[in-house]
Structure formats: C-alpha cells, structure tokens
Amino acid sequence: MQKVSTFLWFDNQAEHAANFYVSLFKNSRIIDTSYYAENMPMPKGTVMVITFTLDGIEYQAINGGPHYKLTPAVSLSVSCESQEEVDHLWSKLTADGGQEVQCGWLTDKFGLSWQIIPAAFLALLKKADAVQTERMVQAMMQMRKLDMAALQRAYDGK
C-alpha cells in the first residue's frame, strides 16, 4: 500500500469507473473493495471504497453520494510514448459521453478530467528555445487531442 494516493469521489459509480480505468492501462488491477453495511449512508452491500492501481500507481474511489462532484481542478495526467497510445486512450476516455476539452484535456463519462500528453511534447517543452516552444504551444492551443506530428512541425517552424 502506498503511503499517499489519490482518492476520487463518485456518486455511485466508483466500481464501474475503477474497472473501466483498470482496463485501459497495463500493470493495473483492483486491489480491494469494501462495502457499506447496515445503517450507513448507502444501501447495505453497495461498494463503499475500491482500491486499484493504474500502471502500478494506487488510487482509491468512494461511492460517497451526490454531495461532491469531480472538477477539472484535479486531473490525471498520462505521458504517452506514441501517438497511437494518445489516440487509443483519447478514443476510450471520450467514448460513451466523455467530452473533449482543449490542449490534450478531456473529461471521461464519469466526470474525471484527464490530460493525455505525448512524452515527446513534454521533452520539447524542457528545451531552452523560447521561439520554438512558443510556436508549438500556439499550435497546441488550437487542438483538442494533441497531434505530436503537428506539434513537432510547429516547433520546427514548418
């Protein structure tokens, strides 16, 4: 068990969300599930907290009721090794009611915000050339899903 992990609040979809997320990433699994008992805020037998890993990182999700909502103020960021990985995750996470946002951000069908970012983009951001970086960022601002080939062309001034 990790000492610190992200804890996500859902109305009543924690188990469904965790199973969906686990299906998207290798080295991911459900670790533990606890259930509400009699005289608790949800019906007896309803999933209370589910603990899971995404690519080895531990998360927890609760069915806490409608009191709180997920917001873009907290997002999960995924550094993708290829455009194919970006495309795959984007497709899966925007399916069934997910929403494209801008600049590599999306909101999935459960309301959780994600940043799906090519690792090559992050590497170029660390370089010192301000003119190239500005061109690339300007191109990114016009995108929803990031297209690394187009970002590289903008960086190169082509």
Image: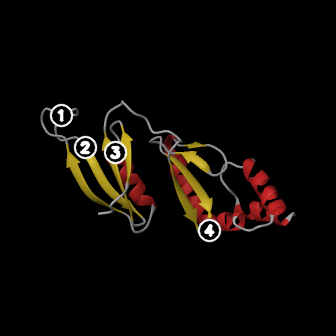
The residue under label 3 is which amino acid type? Answer: Ala
Question: What is the distance, in whole Å, between disc 3 and disc 2 at their CAs?
Answer: 8 Å
* Residue 7 on image: x %, y %: 37, 49
Question: Which residue is tagged 1?
Answer: 40
Could you say whether the residue bearing mark 4 is in a helix, strand or loop? loop
Q: Position of residue 43 (x, y in %)?
A: 19, 34
- Residue at the limit of the structure toward the right, as seen here: 158
Task: Say the numbered circle drawn on residue 48.
Answer: 2
Tell me the SS state at disc 3.
Answer: helix
User: Height in image: 35 above or below 68?
Assistant: below
Residue 65 relative to residue 95: left or right: left
Locate residue 75 relative to residue 42 in the image: left or right.
Answer: right
* Mark 4 → mark 1, Cα distance in angstroms: 46 Å
Q: Amino acid at mark 2?
A: Met
Query: Gap in Å between the C-alphas at discs 1 and 2?
Result: 10 Å
Mark 4 or mark 1, earlier in chain: 1
> Could you tell me how far apart the alpha carbons at marks 3 and 1 are, in whole angstroms?
17 Å
Element marked by disc 1: loop
Q: Earlier in the sequence, mark 3 or mark 1?
A: 3
Q: Residue at x 87, y 63 (%)?
A: 157
The residue to which callout 4 is attached is 82
Mark 2: secondary structure:
strand
Q: Where residue 3 sits in the image (x, y, percent)?
A: 33, 60
Q: Which mark is residue 14?
A: 3
Quarter where residue 128 is shown: bottom right
